[in-house]
Image (tube, rainbow, N blue to C red):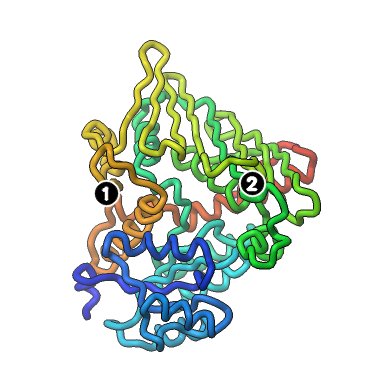
Amino acid sequence: MPATDIGKRELRMAMIGGGPGALIGETHRRAARLDGRLRLVAGSFSSDPAKSREQGEKLFLDPARAYGSWKEMLRAESAMPADKRIDLVSIVTPNHLHLEQAAASLAAGFHVVLDKPMTLNLAEARRLHAAVEKSGRIFALTHTYTGYSMVKLARDLVKGGRLGKIRKIMAEYPQGWLYRRFEDDPSNKQASWRTDPARSGSGCLGDIGTHAANLTETVSGLRIVEVAAEISTLVGGRRNDDDLNLLVRWENGAKGVVLASQVATGEENDVSIRVYGDQASLEWRHGDSEHLRLRHPDRPMEIWSRGAAYVAAASPAAARNCRLAACHPEGMIEAFANIYANVAEAIVERGSGKPKSAIATDFPDHHDGLRGMLFVDAALASARAGGKWTRLDS
């Protein structure tokens, strides 16, 4: 099928990782197929070829395209005719594998959606950033919270000057799932690799601290320039960090905090952000993702509801990233799906020669991934120096 017809068919997707028992892989698969733009046709789902075949069978794939290794998959798919081979690779493996798998997928000519954080460390992030630039392919990083329509509204209200000059930002990510040493249970693969520095890099900092930091930069439009960090391991015997408290400075002089913890016992994933300007402020919480609160000094608080006509008037992006009518709640899977849907649109625009639209850039990319690893690197350096203010490298 000619490249110009790419908008007349489903895009074909493969997955690396997400085998039997994996958590995030199934979330990605459900999100990718939600809008009917992408179809999973191939995968290397496990480092164990038998498990990869088992997962392929469960997903009703052609057995010949449930590969024994990701390298075999890239070789075989690259050799297929253009009307059969995959368009996109979704990578949902532990962090230490991201660089090699993503760079190889790009070099093979495929677009990439990669679970965050981008890589194991900053040096690897720089290499992958360069690989994306060289490839000219679409690359997306699943900082999922940016996919919520009300986060897009918050971003657009700030960009439109509704808050005035930004002076203070506060982001929190309390989570309690590692409140004790679940990594000691061999069957708990999530806890095992996420608390292993060799496979995850940093722990809480890279896993959810990067989400909070990315949310501040996305909503405010400002870059973090300096951090003073206290990074702790509060569960005895754990090999990786599980709690962090950061003072943060942004490029316009705004100040604030980024807090994250995986040992906040009883907490689920109540991510939140508050942005204070010299004219108004806003607040968004994951636990009430349908609403955005806008506060003024001289009138009652406004509560903006997802899907309302006034939201669409203020932020076309917020309206575009809704699926259900107002008063019918959406959630995490839709936020994930917004990233995949916008990536699909970007691939179609690229393949058909259409001008780049706002949709086709409305997802976190390799620049955001590098920013995340710059944040991690500076925070770790600050913590090692006893909380000394440390600038993010450029």
| Residue 213 appears in view | no
Residue 253 - label:
none
How many residues crowd around disc 2 within 10 Å: few (fewer than 14), some, or many (20 or more)? many
Viewer-proximal residue among 87 and 126: 87
Q: Is mark 2 on a helix, strand or loop?
A: loop
User: The residue under label 2 is which amino acid type?
Assistant: Gln
The residue lying furthest to the top in this view is 298
The one of 15 and 77 positioned closer to us in this rendering: 15
Compare marks 1 and 2 and give the one earlier in the sequence: 2
Q: In this view, does 239 lie to the left or right of 344?
A: right
* Position above or below: 142 against 18: above
Is 304 left, or right, of 393 in this rendering?
A: left
- Tell me the quadrant of the picture where the N terminus can be found: bottom left
Q: Where is residue 291 in the image (x, y as percent from the top left)?
A: 37, 33
Q: What residue type is labelled 1?
A: Arg
Which residue was labeled with disc 2? 262
**Left or right of residue 13, residue 46 in this image:** right
Q: Is residue 85 visible?
A: yes
Q: In this view, does 334 lie to the left or right of 183?
A: left
Relative to 161, does residue 37 appear above or below in the rendering? below
Q: Residue at x 36, y 15 (%)?
A: 300
Q: Nearer the viewer, residue 184 or 83?
A: 184
Where residue 85 appears, x then y in whole percent?
34, 81
Q: Which residue is drawn at 69% across and 67% down?
A: 186
Secondary structure under tag 1 reads loop
Q: Where is residue 70 in the image (x, y as percent from the top left)?
A: 51, 80
Discs 1, 2 touching: Cβ within 8 Å: no
Q: In this view, does 391 lie above or below 186?
A: above
Residue 232 percent location from the top left of the image: 74, 44
Distance from the alpha carbon under mark 1 to that under mark 2: 31 Å
Name the residue tied to disc 1: 323
